[in-house]
Image (spheres, rainbow, N blue to C red):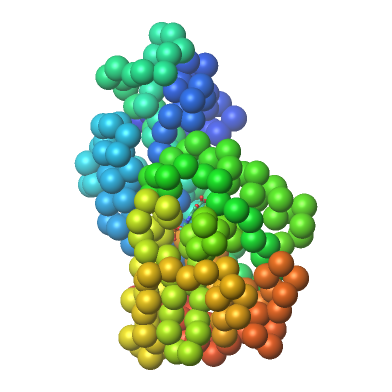
């Protein structure tokens, strides 16, 4: 079952008009919201970011927060497995002809829920490999836009290189991953890129930063260079669907001694605790 413009229908029966601006221009925004044991994880924070993205591109929010909650919970009710990842997309809607400028339209709302397989700790402890590439994306990466051409090319490159993710750098500064935020640890300090327009400020990123007190880490949100990344004690990537993943190989260079570090274990435990709260 999926949700499309007010109705719950079978996915293979769901369709949109060809004049939808999401189809023609990628003119839309989205959210990915995890749900554990039937409970939506940090829904309010996701809805706040949804509102920020909508405001940035002048798409009206079709529903109140209470209505979103009702729809998402109803959709979750159709799914069998306990952990779900909800994909929610709002496009500007369908016009009568293809033109770049827009007028007031009825936004198209599409939501699907998929089983979310959480990697267990022993699998995560094996560590993951990434490659680095220049960040060629536009300068409004803070908007969670559905137009993701650069990101999909990066992820295709990652697939072909048989690695987990592509870590991006702009003017030699690490921004984020193609589908995640990036952290590094050096000498008891947690480094990450500032939440400016060059990254999508992740909901998981905020929780990683929140864990720093418990894990006795200092925080530095001023960013770091690719060279610093390659000499880090620990490197992690984070996202709603990956949670916090330890990276042990970057461009075929081993991170530290190639073993997952103890700070990762602390942030991992912190995050698992939040899921159980
Ligand atoms: N991606 N940066 C980018 C470019 C992302 O695409 C994502 C998430 C994140 C992490 O955000 P969060 O912690 O709120 O999931 C950072 C989602 C999962 C996706 O595109 O499917």
Point out residue 82 in the picture as x, y percentages from the top left corner: 50, 61
Q: Quadrant of residue 172?
A: bottom right
Point out residue 130 in the picture as x, y percentages from the top left corner: 67, 65
Which residue is depicted at the point 68% across and 88% down? 257
Q: Quadrant of residue 90?
A: top left
Judged left or right of residue 261, residue 4 is left
Q: Is residue 80 visible?
A: no
106 and 103: which one is in front? Answer: 103
Which residue is depicted at the point 40% across and 44% down? 140
Judged left or right of residue 123, residue 4 is left
Residue furthest to the front in view is 171
Q: Is residue 208 visible?
A: yes
Residue furthest to the top in view is 96
| Image height of 15 relative to 191, above or below | above
Point out residue 123 in the picture as x, y percentages from the top left corner: 67, 76
| Image height of 170 relative to 276, above or below | above
Which residue is depicted at the point 55% across and 34% down? 11
Point out residue 263 in the picture as x, y percentages from the top left corner: 50, 87
Judged left or right of residue 231, residue 202 is left
Which residue is depicted at the point 35% across and 56% down? 196
Q: Quadrant of the C terminus?
A: bottom left
Count the marks. Answer: 0
């Amino acid at each position: 079952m999926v949700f499309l413009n007010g109705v719950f229908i079978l996915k293979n029966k769901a369709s949109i008009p060809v004049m939808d601006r999401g189809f023609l221009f990628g003119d839309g925004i989205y959210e990915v919201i995890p749900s554990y044991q039937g409970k939506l994880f940090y829904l309010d924070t996701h809805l706040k970011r949804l509102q920020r993205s909508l405001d940035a591109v002048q798409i009206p929010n079709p529903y109140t927060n209470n209505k979103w909650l009702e729809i998402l919970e109803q959709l979750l009710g159709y799914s069998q497995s306990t952990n779900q990842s909800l994909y929610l997309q709002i496009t500007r809607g369908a016009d009568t002809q293809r033109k770049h400028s827009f007028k007031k339209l009825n936004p198209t709302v599409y939501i699907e829920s998929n089983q979310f397989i959480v990697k267990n700790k022993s699998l995560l402890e094996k560590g993951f490999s990434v490659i680095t590439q220049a960040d060629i994306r536009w300068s409004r990466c803070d908007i969670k836009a559905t137009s993701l051409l650069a990101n999909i090319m990066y992820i295709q490159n990652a697939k072909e290189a048989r690695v987990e993710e592509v870590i991006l750098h702009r003017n030699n500064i690490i921004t984020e991953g193609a589908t995640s935020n990036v952290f590094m640890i050096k000498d008891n300090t947690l480094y990450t890129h500032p939440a400016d327009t060059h990254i999508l400020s992740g909901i998981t990123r905020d929780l990683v930063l929140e864990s720093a007190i418990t894990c006795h880490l200092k925080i530095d949100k001023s960013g770091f260079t690719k060279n610093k990344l390659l000499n880090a004690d620990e490197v992690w990537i984070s996202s709603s669907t990956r949670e916090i993943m330890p990276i042990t190989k970057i461009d075929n260079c081993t991170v530290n001694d190639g073993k997952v570090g103890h700070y990762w274990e602390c942030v991992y435990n912190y995050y698992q605790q939040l899921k159980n709260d």
